[in-house]
Image (spheres, rainbow, N blue to C red):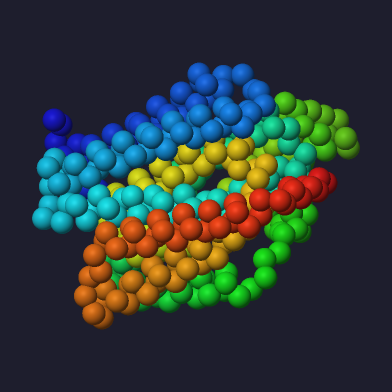
Amino acid sequence: MPEFLLAEWLDKPVWMWIAFMSIVVALLAFDLGIWHKDDKDMGISESLWLSAFYLAFSCLYGAAVWWAYTNGALKTSDGVHAGIAFFTGFFIEKALSIDNVFVISLIFGYFAIPRKYQYRALVWGILAVIVLRGLMIAIGAELVDRYSWILYIFGAFLIGTGIKMLVVPEGDPDISKNPVVKFFKKHMRVTDELHGEKFFIRKPDPVTGKIVLWATPLFLALAVINVADIIFAVDSVPAIFAITTDTFIVYTANIMAILGLRALYFALAAMVHRFHYLKYALALVLVFIGLKIFWNQLVGKLDPAISLGVTVALIAGGIVYSLWKTRDEKAPAVAER
């Protein structure tokens, strides 16, 4: 193996990062180049099948990570804990991402994006997520490595966020007042209508008559969705760092959870109102993870299996209770611009 592949980057051999990114690229190529080569409206059945594929693949990948840390090239004395940490981080990110679905549906509704273009926009958005989450996690890892006390800040932030979710009433975001929308409309030419799957087009300027570049509403929707993802990552990234400071596990668990969310969106978007009470379960998860940081630092390391068990129990309980409590509710209408 070439020497540069054995060199370490963020505490792991370069070949591991290349291997993971190759997997992600292959999945995206399969998604866009084969499964969704032509734009079409994804039905709930197809969404569930594709989601099941991503979930199964993520679990197989998690099993491979578990094996690598216990018997493979990355074998350590606490390899089992590393494997548990991956699945704990994966489930936390997956559950937290469900909150994104309602916001994404509002964004698509505001810009009047047809369903047949939504999936392509979401998949392309993953490319930005891969980079932006990578930057946030790399910065977080560097801070934790240099200043271990920052974990206390992460813990306090998670506890505060969880309590806020429990006590502050939830309101629908006003997309028309979103600063990203205002910025692009002020600094770019934006068409009033869609132009198929295109993010940009060239057409005459109404004043000068010159052919210039215009952004389309599909691009604005994509930009707003990616900014929303960054905001959600402010919660999810510290939560996974509270589980493990292994940058490779933090990043891969994050990305694996997000890859499948884009497919699951089309099944969840129609029934996201049914998950209202999941918010409170997620709030309790954040409070638990935040308290776990203080427990680990002041008392002793909590068994990772307990963290995984509590996390799964709270999330599963929130989902089941939400579906039971809202079994007679109808989906609210989504306002369009």
Image location (x, y in percent) of residue 139: 38, 59
The N terminus sits in image quarter: top left
**Which residue appears at 79% of the width and 37% of the height?**
191
User: Picture coordinates of residue 101 (x, y %)?
Assistant: 61, 48
Give left or right: position of 2 versus 298.
left
Q: Which residue occupies the extreme right position in the image?
A: 207
Instruction: Report the number of discs.
Output: 0
Residue at coordinates 12% horizontally, 52% vertically from top-left? 76
Q: Which of 226 and 304 is in front in this view?
A: 304
- Whether residue 30 is visible, yes or no, is yes
Q: Where is residue 38 in the image (x, y as percent from the top left)?
A: 61, 19
Asked if residue 286 lies left or right of residue 194, the reply is left
* Residue at (66, 54) in percent of width and height: 326
Q: Nearer the viewer, residue 115 or 201?
A: 115
In the image, residue 35 sits, relative to residue 259, either above or below, namely: above
Residue 184 visible within the image: no
Residue at the image position 73 percent from the left and 47 percent from the top: 331
Q: Which of 269 and 241 is in front in this view?
A: 269
